[in-house]
Image: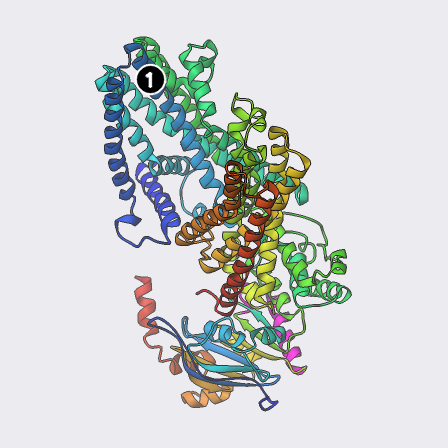
């Protein structure tokens, strides 16, 4: 393994990350160089020291007992390595999921004399360095805590354990990348719709898994388990860096050294596995899906009888195929479905009985509002990315005799259909957890559909006004400015649609106002439809402009 | 409508991308059933011209009429009549060749029986049989080019705009496409195509247009271009190099060898 090649290649991967994530609004100069990460890291380290000092001062001012302080230090120091492993793994994984199907191939580098080991280590180094500011902020935060509470040695162990944890997270991603590439090839051989379903299911599960890790519940439970000296924890290698810290905090130097060595050993084992897998599953060509020997020509659809044109059907069919077959789009499509589940995490994990609220002043339907918020955000995001994902394939639409109305309608229709699946899922959760009445459930679905339409139309309007057609390895499909404006308007829209609910609350306080829950939702829904119509017109103007002037 | 013998007319076309000149006061007339070749160095404006003729690019000034229709005013009408093959076509890689052609046929309003017959025939003719059920992701460059060409001729266009259409094609398919262009021309289909392969341009085209810096440098039949260059008995490559003012090829080769 040649170190200079490894470092050079890691630098190239770093540049790729930097320039693909920030290309829209930052120019050349320091912002486009890896040194930027080190600068951000230094600032975050300093900020961490400030927060850590403030924490210790707060504890002293609050008169915390030495036992309380020890417990808090154990929780903070012990939690950091677990959090870092989860963070590096998740960020690396999400980065991988964002990769476009076309960039899966190793063709761009496999003509160069780069060995699998150089590839794996450079990629690991690149991932670790990219997210290193997080290590620095946690180390900065722990520094004053360690010194001021007399745990300097534990702090030094924490520094080593944090670095090891960061590398464990990064190298695990490398293993997963190789396995995903292998799975992708295997699925491709399976081919057809089964492969598509498996891939969608896989991505949904991966996203849910990563979100569960970040829900906070898991980490707290793990820390409690480690703190209570649960014997079973020593069998979990991912906890070894944490155990090295909790051991030193209990003044058990030998045990700490033992777990630190085990952590290094685990990192080495993972690295070797990553090397073996990468050299075995080196991806040479992007996988091609096999559907049939002849190919399928679509027949005459029954939907034509209800007035759906052949053009609209062709466009929606194309949208569905794009969304289910392109890896970089599948993850977008799953967002409106996953968000309601994520938002319901507190309800799922909370020990407090949810039904008790129903007997009070507030209807349980109010508790469904956060779910609608999740579906709305997911819809908005999906809509915003719908135009930019045409990428360099836009000429296909531009060169055909297509009106902007047809394109916009198909985009809104597809976004709405996908999000309605999330909505129905949300409704299911609402019924299960909040035990709402049938009338309330129907109200929920009605207002949900108007919300979905409004957010989908707004999303397409923003996506067509601020599209990002660059087909990089990690496409984003909407510019940063567009994302910010879209998110702002999307939230404003949802708040405006929620205004009648505020009136309803006022009506409960001032009984003279003749407001019912259903009426509030109806008014909100009507507002949503008005927004949808306005956004539709805006979208048509923008898409017409795009079809008339192919982006250079 | 203009003279029926003129299928494409462009007057004083200019296109500027900031300081960069795409087209510069270019005027062009192409007759019905004519096969016109566009020649020029990289960046001379060939692709920009083809896109402008189809209404994919809005000119900074000037106008284009295709079969008498103003492209700026009625781009959709023009696109109904024209088939287009871009340079390095990016197709929908997530579709199979059949699904892609099915999509194009539906948008172009071709009925079920007709599209089925045409798609099957085209796939047979261009040797894609057996591969049409796989997504385009795994296709070679040449296979993708074939799919793009099929998409362009599926609706029996009256005008064909092709940007280096023979790129990546195997000799048999290239021959099929060349014969196809001749055959379509006999049926009155007007074709403009750009190429860097001068032998092909001479073999296929009725007339040639050489572009440089967004302007027409010279225009005429291959023989007329030879005469303009004062190289009556030379190959078209010599004529092209002389007309475009390319000098010192030997010096460049020497520099590359070093």
Q: How is the image coloured?
A: rainbow
From the viewer's perspective, is A323 left or right of A278? Answer: right
| Classed neighbour count for the residue bearing mark 1: other residues with Cα under 10 Å, few (<14), some (14–19), many (≥20) | some
Q: x and y percent of residue B176 in the render?
A: 64, 70
Q: Per the image, is A308 magenta?
A: no
Q: Is residue B252 above or below residue A127?
A: below
Task: Give the x, y percent position of residue A110.
Answer: 45, 45
Residue of label 1: A72
Exactly how many numbered labels are in the figure?
1
Front residue (pair A534, A26) = A534
Residue drawn 48% across and 82% down? Answer: B63
| Magenta extent | B165-186
Q: Out of B181 and A141, give the one closest to the viewer.
A: A141
Callout 1: SS: helix
Question: Is B187 placed above or below A103 here?
Answer: below
* Quadrant location of the C terminus of chain B in the rendered image: bottom left
Question: Residue B96 sits in which quadrant?
Answer: bottom right
Q: Position of residue A480 (x, y in %)?
A: 40, 51
Q: Is residue A2 above or below residue A405?
A: above
């Amino acid at each position: 393994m040649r170190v200079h090649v490894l470092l050079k290649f890691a630098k190239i991967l770093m540049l790729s990350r930097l320039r693909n994530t920030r290309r829209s609004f930052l120019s050349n100069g320091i912002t486009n160089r890896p040194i930027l990460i080190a600068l951000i890291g230094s600032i975050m380290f300093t900020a961490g020291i400030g927060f850590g000092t403030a924490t210790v001062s707060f504890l002293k001012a609050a008169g915390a007992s030495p036992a309380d302080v020890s417990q808090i230090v154990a929780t903070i120091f012990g939690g950091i390595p677990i959090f870092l492993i989860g963070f590096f793994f998740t960020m690396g994984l999400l980065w991988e999921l964002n990769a476009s199907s076309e960039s899966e191939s190793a063709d761009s580098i496999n003509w160069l004399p780069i060995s699998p080991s150089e590839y794996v280590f450079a990629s690991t180094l690149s991932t670790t360095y990219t997210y290193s500011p997080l290590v620095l902020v946690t180390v900065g935060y722990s520094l004053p805590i360690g010194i001021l509470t007399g745990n300097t040695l534990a702090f030094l162990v924490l520094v080593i354990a944090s670095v090891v944890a960061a590398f464990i997270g990064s190298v695990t991603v490398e293993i997963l990348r190789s396995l995903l590439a292998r799975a992708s090839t295997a699925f491709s051989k399976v081919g057809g719709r089964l492969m598509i379903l498996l891939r969608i299911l896989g991505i949904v599960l991966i996203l849910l898994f990563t979100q569960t890790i970040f829900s906070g519940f898991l980490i707290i439970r793990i820390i409690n388990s480690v703190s209570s000296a649960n014997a079973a924890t020593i069998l979990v290698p991912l906890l070894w860096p944490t155990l090295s810290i909790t051991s030193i905090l209990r003044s058990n130097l030998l045990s700490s050294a033992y777990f630190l060595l085990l952590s290094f050993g685990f990192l080495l084992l993972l690295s070797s596995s990553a090397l073996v897998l990468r050299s075995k599953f080196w991806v040479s060509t992007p996988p091609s899906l096999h559907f049939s020997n002849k190919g399928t020509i679509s027949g005459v659809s029954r939907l034509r009888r209800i007035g759906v044109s052949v053009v609209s059907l062709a466009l929606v069919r194309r949208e569905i195929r794009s969304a289910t077959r392109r890896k970089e789009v599948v993850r977008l499509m799953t967002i409106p479905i996953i968000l309601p589940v994520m938002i319901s995490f507190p309800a799922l994990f909370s020990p407090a009985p949810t039904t008790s609220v129903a007997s009070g002043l507030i209807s349980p339907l109010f508790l469904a509002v956060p779910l609608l918020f999740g579906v709305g955000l997911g819809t908005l995001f999906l809509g915003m990315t719908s135009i930019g994902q045409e990428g360099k394939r836009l000429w296909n639409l531009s060169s055909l005799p297509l009106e902007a109305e047809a394109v916009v309608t198909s985009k809104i229709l597809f976004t709405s259909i996908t999000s309605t699946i999330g909505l129905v899922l949300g409704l299911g959760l609402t019924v299960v957890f909040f035990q709402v009445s049938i009338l309330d459930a129907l109200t929920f679905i009605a207002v949900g559909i108007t919300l979905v339409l409004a957010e989908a139309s707004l999303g397409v309007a923003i996506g067509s006004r601020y599209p990002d057609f660059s087909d990089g390895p990690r496409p984003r499909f909407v510019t940063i400015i567009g994302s910010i404006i879209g998110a702002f308007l999307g939230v404003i829209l949802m708040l405006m649609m929620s205004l009648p609910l505020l009136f309803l609350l006022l009506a409960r306080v001032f009984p003279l106002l003749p407001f019912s829950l259903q009426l509030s939702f109806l008014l909100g829904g009507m507002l949503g439809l008005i927004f949808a119509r306005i956004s539709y017109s805006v979208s048509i103007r923008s898409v017409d402009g795009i079809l008339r002037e192919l982006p250079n | 409508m203009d003279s029926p013998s003129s299928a494409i007319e462009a007057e004083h076309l200019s296109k500027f991308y900031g300081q960069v000149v795409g087209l510069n006061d270019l005027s062009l007339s192409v007759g019905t059933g004519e096969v016109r070749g566009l020649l020029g160095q990289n960046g001379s404006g060939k692709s920009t011209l083809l896109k402008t003729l189809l209404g994919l690019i809005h000119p900074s000034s000037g106008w284009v009429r295709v079969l008498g229709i103003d492209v700026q005013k009625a781009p959709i009408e023009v696109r109904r009549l024209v088939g287009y093959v871009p340079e390095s076509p990016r197709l929908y890689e997530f579709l199979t060749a059949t699904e892609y052609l099915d999509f194009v046929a539906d948008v172009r309003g071709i009925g079920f029986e007709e599209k089925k017959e045409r798609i099957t025939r085209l796939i047979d003719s261009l040797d894609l049989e057996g591969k049409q059920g796989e997504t385009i992701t795994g296709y070679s460059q040449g296979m993708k080019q074939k799919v793009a060409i099929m998409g362009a001729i599926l609706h029996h266009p009256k005008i064909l705009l092709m940007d280096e259409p023979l790129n990546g094609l195997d000799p048999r398919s290239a021959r099929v496409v060349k014969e196809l262009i001749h055959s379509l021309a006999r049926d009155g289909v007007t074709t403009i195509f750009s190429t860097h392969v001068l032998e092909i341009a001479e073999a296929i085209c009725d007339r040639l247009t050489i572009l440089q810096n967004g302007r027409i440098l010279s225009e005429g039949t291959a023989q007329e271009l030879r005469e303009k260059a004062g190289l009556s008995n030379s190959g078209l490559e010599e004529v092209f190099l002389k007309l475009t003012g390319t000098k010192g090829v030997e010096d460049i080769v020497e520099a590359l060898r070093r």
